[in-house]
Image (cartoon, helix red, strand yellow):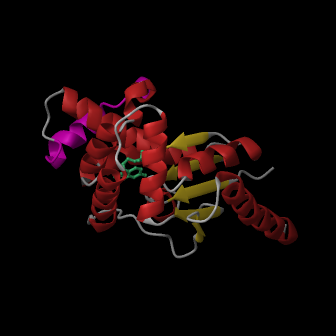
Amino acid sequence: RQPLVIAIDGPAAAGKGTLAQRLAQAYELPYLDTGLLYRAVGRLAHEAGVDLDDPDAAGSVARRLQTEHLEDPNLRGREAGERASRVAAHYPVRTALLAFQQNFAHRPEGAVLDGRDIGTVICPDADVKIFVTASPEVRARRRSDELIAKGRDAPYERILAETRERDARDAGRAIAPLKPAADAHLLDTSDLDIEAAFRAACQIVDDVLARRAERD
Ligand code: C5P
């Protein structure tokens, strides 16, 4: 079969990670969470005492990134996300991570990638592009509930402020800002649970596959 490449973008906590994993499973495709790359760079830079706001210093950290750095379980936390979004604003960092992501996407078996610039920069030719959104209030509520369920201190108001701050930084940066590709399907999950979001995404993928089958 012809390889299928699915690009999933959107802001933090819109549900894109879960959605991307479910799609990867359903369509039997390898999955790459590209946020992990930026998280790992932020963490390595922090550990090395590098100034996260220095583009060249962060860039040289990004060039030293190895796949084993992605296995660190602490990368999922809020602090790692915050550091990731600081180093992700630098051109040398994004350039250093480009080839790894594109090689992953161009594997013969196809791929699902999720991030902020997959449909716009990394895989502009992706077969399916989905931009997953939800209101900042809904995303902050979900994140806060999730953290509280894990026994963490995560008041809604604080999480909402952090969500807004990260959105502003990701959407406002000069390079590869968070925005939907012109040909992306918008999927607003504000009023959808994960099952409903997954069904909607499958519909989008199936339509693309059906059109492709018709064409061939
Ligand atoms: O998706 P996740 O929350 O793990 O991403 C962490 C940060 O990494 C984002 O806030 C964003 O600044 C950056 N990122 C990016 N481009 C990607 C994936 C993540 O700039 N493709």
Q: Is residue 178 above or below residue 38?
A: below
Q: Position of residue 142 (x, y in %)?
A: 49, 51
Q: Name the residue at the bottom extreme.
A: 182
Tell me if I can see residue 59 in this picture. Answer: yes
Q: Is residue 122 above or below residue 69?
A: below
Q: Is residue 136 above or below residue 19?
A: below
Tell me if I can see residue 106 in this picture. Answer: no
Residue 61 figure quarter:
top left
Residue at (64, 56) in percent of width and height: 193
Residue at (51, 64) in percent of width and height: 133
Q: Position of residue 100 (x, y in %)?
A: 45, 41
Residue at (14, 34) in percent of width and height: 50
Residue at (33, 66) in percent of width and height: 171
- Is residue 148 shown left or right of residue 88? right
Was residue 67 drawn as part of the magenta stretch in this picture? Answer: yes
**Which quadrant is home to the C terminus?**
bottom right
Decide whether the magenta segment is chiefly helix, strand or loop. Answer: helix
